[in-house]
Image (cartoon, rainbow, N blue to C red):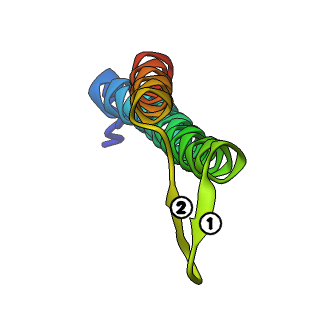
Amino acid sequence: MVIALSACKDDRVSKHEKRISELEAKVKRLQEKQQQDADAASAKEAQFKECVDQADIDYHAAVRGNGTKNGSSSYSVDLRVMQTIERQKESKLEECKLLYR
């Protein structure tokens, strides 16, 4: 007596392997997107810091340029001029916030 055994084809395994492969590819794309977003946020934060630093540099340059030196590191500046310098700095800081936050 000869018994013929036919192999049982199970399509579920290949479907699961295909689904796993698709999910792995999707996870990889999401991780890459997340890394790009993190890099962009980091770059934007660096630009914001640079903008704020420049506002400080401009402020101190304006104080030195419009004031009279008193001692080693202080300056006397006319009140109206100082108010203008401070408004310019505040305006620059607001610009930094709008551009990079």
Q: Which residue is mark 2?
A: 75
Q: Residue at x 66, y 54 (%)?
A: 64
Q: Is residue 9 above or below residue 41?
A: above
Q: Position of residue 9 (x, y in %)?
A: 36, 27
Total numbered badges shown on the rendered structure:
2
Mark seen at residue 100 = none
Specify the quadrant of the image occupied by residue 15: top left
Q: Which residue is mark 1?
A: 69
Front residue of 41 and 95: 95
Q: Position of residue 67 (x, y in %)?
A: 61, 50
Label 2 crowd (10 A; few <14 / some 14-19 / many >=20): some
- Secondary structure under tag 2 reads strand
> Marks 2 and 1: in contact by CB < 8 Å?
yes
Q: Amino acid at mark 2?
A: Tyr
Front residue of 43 and 79: 79
Compare marks 1 and 2 and give the one earlier in the sequence: 1
Q: Amino acid at mark 1?
A: Lys
66 horizontally vs 21: left or right: right
Spatial CA span between label 1 and label 2:
4 Å
